[in-house]
Image: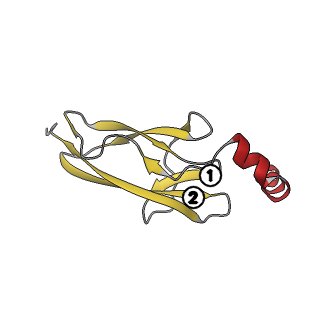
Amino acid sequence: MNQRYTWVTATAPDAILKAVPKVAFEITTNGGAVVQDSHIVLTGKAWIDVDYIRRAGETLPLPVVFDTADTWHMDLPLLCGQNLIALEAVDFSGHVVGSDQITVTSTLCL
């Protein structure tokens, strides 16, 4: 996959941009949501250069599903109260290519 990505981006960058217009990494789930649940399904946008998504400052990838060439979703656990969710998009070379954050408040307190 890495070799194919490198070959395509080096030899046909205009073709890629025409086929899949570049989008900035972002969380599109409504920021500041209040939920009565112990988890939330986040949705967002990311371009094809994103290999994985992780929590800001961490190294392990989160379980993410890339739905289309530029959209993704993931299910994350929530603690009772405010949850700052800061994510980083990492490319195939290990570089952070985008970041975004939202705060989700869970009212489900056991």
How packed mark 1 is, by other alpha carbons closer than 10 Å (few <14, some 14-19, many 20 or more), is some
Asked if labels 1 and 2 touch by Cβ distance under 8 angstroms, the answer is: yes
Distance, label 2 to label 1, CA atoms, is 6 Å
Q: Locate residue 13, reporting x and y percent.
A: 77, 54
Q: Locate residue 64, reporting x and y percent.
A: 51, 41
Residue in front for this viewpoint, 45 or 15: 15
The residue that label 2 is drawn on is: 90
Q: How is the image coloured?
A: secondary structure
Q: Residue at x 15, y 39 (%)?
A: 107
Q: Residue at x 28, y 44 (%)?
A: 78
The answer to whether residue 41 is seen in the rendering is yes
Q: Residue at x 56, y 49 (%)?
A: 23
Residue in front for this viewpoint, 110 or 81: 81
Vertical placement of residue 23 versus 91, above or below: above
The answer to whether residue 1 is seen in the rendering is no
How packed mark 2 is, by other alpha carbons closer than 10 Å (few <14, some 14-19, many 20 or more), is many
Does residue 5 appear to the left or right of 49 in the view shown? right
The residue that label 1 is drawn on is: 51
Q: Amino acid at mark 1?
A: Asp
Q: Amino acid at mark 2?
A: Val
> Which labelled disc corresponds to residue 74?
none
SS type, badge 1: strand
Q: Quadrant of the C terminus?
A: top left
Does residue 5 appear to the left or right of 45 in the view shown? right
Q: Locate residue 100, reporting x and y percent.
A: 41, 56
Does residue 92 appear to the left or right of 29 in the view shown? right
Q: Residue at x 36, y 55 (%)?
A: 101
Residue in front for this viewpoint, 68 or 41: 68
Residue 77 figure quarter: top left
